[in-house]
Amino acid sequence: MFYREAGQFKTTYPSDMAIFPIAQDRIGIGIILAMAFIFIPLFASDFIMSSVMIPFLVFSLAAIGLNILTGYTGLISLGTGAFMGVGAYACYKLMTIFPGVNIIVWIVTAGFFSAAVGILFGIPSLRIKGFYLAVATLAAQFFLQWCFVRIPWLYNYNASGAIEVGTRTLFGIPIVGPNATPEARYYVLLCIVVVLTWIASNLVHGRIGRSWMAVRDMDIAAELMGIKLLDTKLLAFAVSSFYAGVAGACMMFLWYGGGEASDAFNINQSFLILFMVIIGGLGSLIGSFFGAAFISILPTILKFGLPAIGVPLSGATAEHLIHITVGGLIIFFLIVEPHGLARLWQIGKQKLRMWPFPY
Amino acid sequence: MKFRHFALSTAAAVLAGATALTAIPAQAQDQIYVPLLTYRTGPFANSGVPIADGMHDYLRMLNERDGGIGGAKIVIEECETGYDTKKGIECYESTKGKNPVVYNPYSTGITLQMIPKASADKIPVLSMAYGLSASAKGNTFPWIFNPPVTYWDGASAFIRHVAEQSGGFDKLKGKKIGLIHLDAPFGKEPIALLEALSKKYGFELKLYPVAASDMQNQGSVWLNIRRDRPDWIYNQGWGAMNPTAVKEAAKNNFPMDRLVGVWWAGGDDDARGGGDGAKGYKSLNFHAAGTDFPVIQDIQKHVVDKGLSKTPKDKVGENLYNRGVYNSMLIAEAIRNAQKISGKKAITAEDMRKGLESLNITDARLKEIGMAGFAAPMKLTCEDHNGHNKVYVAQWDGTKWVKGSEWMDPLKDEVMPLLESAANDYAKANNWPARTEACQKGS
């Protein structure tokens, strides 16, 4: 009734090609952004900020990265965790070598290092496809993780092998380090995520994104149409790794605040992000957010939310139950909607358009 | 009319809620909140469960037997970390608002995370014989405590044990000493100290790293060991790596009494993994195993027999269970000490730091709390948050851990300079603030 485009006429091509052609969608995005920028920092507790929202945003960014590679270009990667690690270590090295430069610059720059490494490990993708490519990227995961442990230069010869994050400020407000408030870290992260999501949205809706999807749907046909396979695939690897790298740097600096980094970027991390992309919806940006929310927020809510509303769950029992519940929900959603939560969202919107008079 | 009724009842409900909220602080007067970060799930649950049970049961026993500590009841809350750093921070963030007096991170990764955070939030962290060795320097890390020994103390005590067994430090010259270690920060920790000692005493140090993914697949590592034939091996391992190492050592006919594990390699299950061949396996320890202590019997009487514990009855008194008890004893004694200093029943985190910094557990005190012979006396000061206390070598007799050496001091002179420089490096790398908290008089 309220959600329909009747009466909204498009008189120009750009307005017809807009990402959000319906006015209600634009209002919705505005509301979500207002929520994220104003209401959540205003009303959420420190715990919600630092243990729910910040991890959610970090994982969303990583999931967008992997979605560009796996969802849009059709190349399966199991190296996301390692690419995130490259970002984190690059950011750390840059920060310690040039301590005067603002940390946000280095968080973003770290993405380019990750992109370079991603290109390197993406080269085999021209010849290897499908599951075999997954195995090839698995090599990247193991090799890079080996580097994180065995090359002490990466962590400045720290005796514990840990990345140590001192306080860094922006306009005099600490945004990184133990003295940074969750709000400050959240705002920095949110700005990074919003800007990068906007860029990603423009990429996938433009010429580059179309060439990625052409390669995904049938690479021989794409080649015949004049799309250079190597360039396209490597670009997908580069962009994907860039996002993963920035996410990794954000994870270490804005969320964890330093620590044993080699352990944080292990194969489980790669799998987790792959699950986010699959459950959220392959080839959908909003799906990346759904998937990240499902995998990262749900366990936390179950673990701390249920006791808060009076369900007597604690310790190991809760942990086991959470594993069972989340596992069950994953299977449920994959059976009900194999195309991910994003597809459910789309169906919901479609239904809403017809409501209350479906035909 | 209806609306007014609704409004009235809402107002009443809000009022009731408000009074309930204000009632909490009044009640909290004589309560002390101690969060326990434990891991009963995940890949390391095998060792996490007995530790968690021991920690919980001792504090619970104090609640049941004495009604808490100094008249203040201890509120114990377990938060499951699964040995996962991410979940560990979640636990920290979710509990730090409830006025915790101390944190036990129980994972090196979580400890490293917590050191800057807890220092900024001014909550003590008690990482008992794990975590960051350098945090022993109280002048740099006023909020972090890692008694009774650091990994460097442990490695040096191992060298002392080797020297004692071979007839003096001068006999170390020309010996081959191996270090089989987890290829992770925790495992690599003793390398720096052992390298320094090998230069000083002239023994040859051989390193045998085991990748975390190969913990249960050490065949190639032991092939190297067979080729090098080291005289002694020190095992800095964790989790599934330990039983595998013991099993492999037995299979390769390595003399078991020359394989010495760090205290985390001293679980009953670690040694049992080697079967009969594990007899003679050694591990460093700073508390006794077994149930022949009044404190353990009190736990059995007041907690386990009443069904208040999650532990199976026959696991009480195992090495890692007793380690949990020892850990909780440190917490309880520090709380008691803090109560004495501050004169309050319900102490704050700040009081707890003072309590920890002047902790002095003497032989007489150990006897009072039913721990005579259970542990060595230990003492912390404002400068020294570790104490570098005595350890001994425990030996597996095929069914249980028994004492395999006398209590001995670590080589403190070798450890201290390393600690000093490590603490300085940490401070420099992190723009670490200088200590502002004043030291207690007489500590």
Image: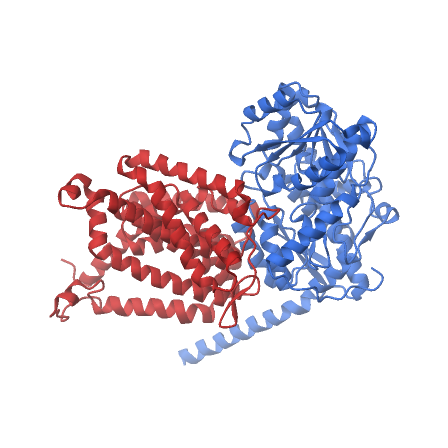
Chain colours: A red, B blue
Residue A330 shown left or right of residue A264 in the figure? left
Residue A87 shown left or right of residue A67 in the figure? right
Residue B154 shown left or right of residue A310 in the figure? right
Residue A288, x across and y down, in percent: 34, 53
Residue A144, x across and y down, in percent: 45, 41
Label tally: 0
Q: Which residue is found at the position 47% from the left and 67% from the top?
A: A44
Residue B254 in the image: above or below residue B155: above
Quadrant in the picture for the N terminus of chain A: bottom left
Q: Is residue A130 visible?
A: yes
Quadrant in the picture for the C terminus of chain A: bottom left
Q: Is residue A281 visible?
A: no
Q: Residue most toward the left?
A: A11
Quarter occupied by residue B19: bottom right
Q: Residue most toward the right?
A: B364
The one nearer the camera, B285 or A299, is B285
Residue A149 in the image: above or below residue B430: above
Residue B96, x across and y down, in percent: 60, 60
Residue A1 in the image: above or below residue A143: below
Residue B358, x across and y down, in percent: 80, 57
Q: Which residue is found at the position 31% from the left and 40% from the top?
A: A123
